[in-house]
Amino acid sequence: MINTMNDQNSRAQHGDVDEVHDVVVVGAGAAGLNAALLLGRARRNVVVIDAGEPRNAPASHMHGFLSRDGLPPAALLDLGRAEIARYGVQLIHGQVEQIDHGYYVRMAGGVVLKARRVLIATGLRDELPDIPGVRERWGKDLLHCPYCHAYEVRDQPLAVLGTHPGAVHQALLLRQWSDDVVFFPHALDLTAQDRERLAACGLRLVEGEIKQLVVDGDRLRGIELVDGRAVPRAAAFLFPRPVAHDELLTQLGCDKDDNGWVTTDRTGRTSVVGVWAAGNVVDRRAQVVAAAGMGSAAAFAINTDLLDEDIDRAVEQRRHAAAATL
């Protein structure tokens, strides 16, 4: 009875909604599109809403995705949008402002969609340090993921900027791709163990605060320190601070871990009934191929959940019909 009253109150607040969608997917990156693809093929009524702000937009190519290695990120999304359209999935460009517990999805501009289940795949943003040149070179020759981009700058003089505690591991990892890696601690307070490990692996440390990235001819040329020293480098890596676009999940009251990230089970199911999450919004380490897999896992689970509900409803209707004939 409480659920019914909540649903009636939501309808009164948002107005009547003519069509109820099986699933509304928020976010059309790899996770959201792959989920929509499987759900569309399962003949579910699916709508995908996307604000058009992918995390990897600055990158010219993506790597590590079987059969799509080296493809521009935008091209992958174009292919995905064309594929889901073949299965009747509707794609709407827009911003979702709020999702009620009755699964009313309210968009900027007043459009409201009603869903039976919701998948949030809104990704994250990379919070970059305030160092001149960082934003301009981000995704070009200032990089983040060694697995995604180090091969393309292999055997070149590389820099790692110490703007995040994770930079130490990043620098150690990069030695697999180059023998010439310089670590700039910048504002990091390195431990004795950090210094020992870096030295043991052949990394050179350059102490001092970073002033700016030296750029000439639309190419990174080196790293300049506030004391005037400049160290020539062909490419640089830094570890950004990942900030999840999890506002919708937070509004819904989804549980979070001690680090503030929304928790899910292996299928992406959150603590809120009927709400799933997949991709970088819940896993900052997920590469494109992993995010797509998370979307796939969520789609299977969502379809099974809907199927169980459909069967329960069919059984209940059959019982009512049988009782009416007595």
Image: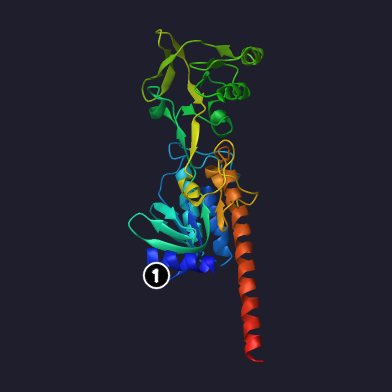
Residue ID at (55%, 46%): 279
Quick one: which residue is furthest to the front in this view? 2
Residue 300's image quarter?
bottom right
- Above or below residue 139? Residue 304 is below
Q: Give residue 195's position: percent from left, percent from top.
A: 61, 13
Helix, strand or loop at disc 1? loop
Residue 325's image quarter?
bottom right
Q: Is residue 264 left or right of residue 45?
A: right
Tell me the colour scheme of the image: rainbow
Quick one: which residue is furthest to the left in this view? 109
Residue ID at (45%, 43%): 54
The answer, for residue 253, to whether it is visible in the render is yes
Q: How many marks?
A: 1
Q: Amino acid at mark 1?
A: Asp
Q: Give residue 81's position: percent from left, percent from top.
A: 47, 55
Question: Which one is in front, 208 or 213?
Answer: 208
- Above or below residue 290? Residue 216 is above
Question: Which one is in front, 14 or 150?
Answer: 14
Quarter occupied by the N terminus: bottom right
The answer, for residue 68, to whether it is visible in the render is no
Residue ID at (61%, 80%): 317
Q: Give residue 301's position: percent from left, percent from top.
A: 63, 58
Quick one: which residue is furthest to the bottom in this view? 326
- Above or below residue 36? Residue 52 is above
Q: Is residue 316 left or right of residue 94?
A: right
Question: Which one is in front, 256 or 244?
Answer: 256
Report which residue position mark 1 lands on: 16
Label 1 neighbour load within 10 Å: few <14, some 14-19, many 20+: few
- Above or below residue 102? Residue 187 is above
Q: Give residue 66's position: percent from left, percent from top.
A: 61, 44
Quarter occupied by the C terminus: bottom right
Residue ID at (39%, 70%): 16
